[in-house]
Amino acid sequence: MDLEKILETLKNKGYATAYFEKAEEAGEYLDKIIDNKTVGFGDSATLLSMNMLQKLSTHNEVFDPQNCSEEMEFIATAKKCLSTQIYLTSVNALSATGEIVNIDGTGNRVAGSLFGHEKVYFVIGINKLVPTLEKAIWRARNIAAPKNAMRLGLQTPCAKRGDRCYDCTSPDRICNGMVIHLKKMNDIEMEIVLINEQLGL
C-alpha cells in the first residue's frame, strides 16, 4: 500500500498526521509535544509496548485504566480519562481509504476517542493497516478482538480457539460496541501517528 497516498487521504479527512519508521521515534515525538497536560489512555497494547505511561508521567498527569489493580479502580480511572485535555489510544484497524475501526466491551476507549478533549492521538502500527473499510471491520472482529481476549485471559470462544469471532453470548464478551470514524470529528483536534512497525494486536 502507498503510505504517502494513505497519509494524504487522512489529511483530506481532517486529521493531522505524523509518520515514523520506528516506535521509539514516535514515542519521543509524543513525549516532546505533550507537556504539562492531563492525559488519558484508551486501553492499548501499542501504548503499553511503547512505555508511553512511563514517558509521559514525568511531566504530565496521566490516567491509564490498564494500570489498575481492581475492577472498581478501572472504572473510576476510565471515567477520569474521558475528561482529560489529551487522549491517546490505538485502533483495531485503519483502512487505506481513511476509516478507523475500533471495537470495545466497556465503551471507555471508543467514548474517549469521540469527544471531550483538546486533542486525540491515534497511535497505529503498520500491522493495523488494511485496504478497505470492509477488511478493517473484519480485522477488528476476527484478529484484534480474539487476540485481546486471549491477552486478558477471558473465557470466550475466540480466546479459547484463537481463530475468529463467534459472535458469542459469553459474559466475558468484549465485542459490545463498534465505532467507525469516517472522518475527523468536529470541534476537536485529532492526529494519526502511523508507525512502520508491528505494534499492538
Image: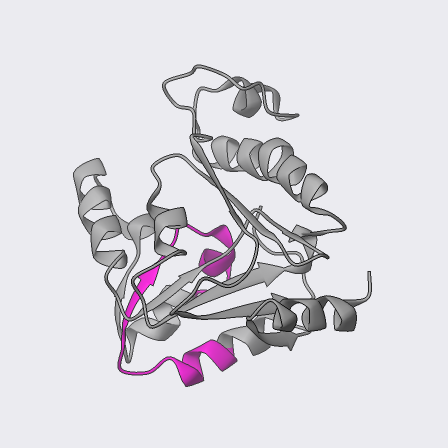
* Residue at 42% across, 16% down: 170
Viewer-proximal residue among 6 and 21: 6
Query: Is 45 drawn above or below residue 34 in the view shown?
Result: above
Residue furthest to the right: 1
Residue stretch rendered in magenta on the structure = 28-51
* Residue at 51% across, 31% down: 150
Where residue 157 sits: x, y (%)? 54, 17
> In the visual, does 73 lie left or right of 2?
left
| Scheme of image coloration | one colour
Where residue 155 sits: x, y (%)? 44, 20
Residue 115 lies in the magenta stretch: no
Where residue 106 sits: x, y (%)? 34, 37
> In which quadrant is the N terminus drawn?
bottom right
> In the visual, does 32 lie left or right of 95?
left
Residue furthest to the front: 186
> In the visual, does 132 lie left or right of 38?
right
Residue furthest to the top: 169
* Residue at 59% across, 24% down: 165
* Residue at 57% across, 54% down: 182
Asked which quadrant contains residue 12, the reply is bottom right
Residue 32 lies in the magenta stretch: yes
Q: How many numbered marks, from 0 up?
A: 0
Viewer-proximal residue among 137 and 149: 137
Query: Is 156 drawn above or below residue 75 in the view shown?
Result: above
Asked which quadrant contains residue 107, the reply is top left
Query: Is 142 drawn above or below residue 193 in the view shown?
Result: above
Query: Is 33 drawn above or below residue 127 in the view shown?
Result: below
